[in-house]
Image (cartoon, rainbow, N blue to C red):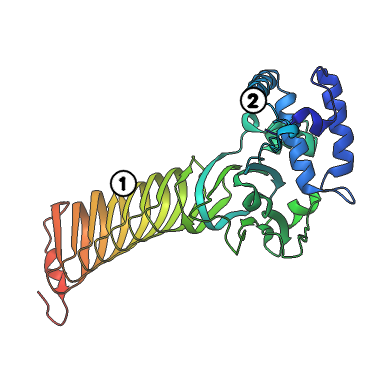
Amino acid sequence: MMNYYDTLGVSPQATQTEIKASFRQLAKVYHPDMSGGDALRFASIKEAYEVLSTPHRRQWYDRQANAAQARAPRRSSRRNGARPFRPQASSRYTRIMSIAISRAGLFSIERLTGSIAIQPTTPDNLWQSTLDKFGEDDPRRLSRHIIQIKVTGDRDHVRAVYPVATEVGIAVERQDTDGEAEMFGRNPAGARQSGEGISMRGGIDGHMGTLGKPLHIQATVPKGIALQFDDIQGPIDLGDQEAELVARLHKANLLRAGRLAHASLILRDHSRAHVAHVEGNADVMSLDRSRALLGGRFERFRCVIEQQGLVEILGPVEALLAEVHGMGYLNARNKVADAHLDIGDNGLVQIARLLDSLQGTRSGNGRVKVLSRQFRIPFLHRFATRGYEA
């Protein structure tokens, strides 16, 4: 366990005033925005300050430290030739970052093995380190353009993650082979001006994690900022972001999301996606044995389902465009105004209620089943097989 008192250079009996004063002095020296700053050292300083500046967290830390000291075995005597006991440092490590971004930006995570949990940034969940960094007197205004990121995992993997500015905003990349990371956009104002987005990628050997040593990311992102996840191996839990979501998942991933403005999903293997509400459009590709369940109100719902993929639509759809092949299954549980379908092999499409027209093509044993329709019109007769008009 890291000694937070030694990190801040204070005694265990230090008062809150002494702890705060020591943190401010160290921040002036080690903050990444300062000339000659040390990002790793400052992350440890922030972690120590966040614990010791909060009374109940400090009490918990003191109890843990005292218990660890009581459990530590005594050093063996050198007179009998035995080596002294040297406790090994823990490989678990946490890195905290707070970055400003415009409300029209993008938050992207690529090639990650681990878990992701994202909630909207609000005045109530701003971290103390964020308030100290930006010195904002109005938490409500600050929460509109601040992304907070906490990365936990293997020490070497977490240390390899660095925020850098790119042409599209701020990226989080791995440290280079010389042990130095080129970092730009440390000035919050400069980050806000570039403001296109934040991309987290890279890590050890080009990956942020491995199957043996996954990373865990906790983040808060302002509502309205688009989210993008590419090549993710692990669960994703999203709150009501009310923004666009683009995700590519595989290897038995599980995605849960609240309210979104638009959803674009590519699901492979045994991946699962459950989106509570989409207000707008949705694009879904379900391959292999993946499953997607989406609720909301859709102006346009477009999907491609192959192998044994399954897509279920819980809300009403104005325009449904679907390609269903293999043993794919599409189930529209609510009303659909217009549908254009391409069904092949053993694909099956089921529509609970059709309001207007059904068009498209069918081949093999592909089937479409409409449970009820608004008007008694021969729309099913306009549904044709390839080269043959029914």
* Residue extending farthest front: 80
The Cα atoms of the two marked residues, 1 and 2, are separated by 54 Å
The reply to whether dot 1 and dot 2 touch (C-beta < 8 Å) is no
Relative to 44, 296 lies left or right: left
**Which residue matches tag 1?**
315
In the orientation shown, which residue stands out farthest toward the bottom?
Answer: 387
Indicate whether 240 appears above or below 281. above
Nearest to the observer: residue 289 or residue 192: 289
Q: Residue at x 19, y 71 (%)?
A: 344
Q: Is residue 191 visible?
A: yes
Q: Amino acid at mark 2?
A: Ala
Question: Which residue is pictured at 71% across the width and 59% down the height?
Answer: 175
Element type where label 1 sits in the image: loop
The percent coordinates of residue 65 (x first, y second) are: 68, 24
Q: Nearer the viewer, residue 136 or 319?
A: 136
Q: How many marks?
A: 2
Pick the quarter of the image with the N terminus: top right
Q: Amino acid at mark 1?
A: Gly
Say few, some or many: other residues with alpha carbon within 10 Å of mark 2 (under 14 / 14 to 19 / 20 or more).
few
- Image mark for residue 68: 2
SS of the residue at dot 2? helix
Q: Nearer the viewer, residue 19 or 154?
A: 154
Q: Residue at x 24, y 52 (%)?
A: 332
For residue 138, say whether it is visible. no
Sequence-wise, the earlier of marks 1 and 2 is 2
**Residue 271: % across, % down:** 36, 54
Q: Looking at the picture, how far across and down is residue 295, in whole percent? A: 34, 45
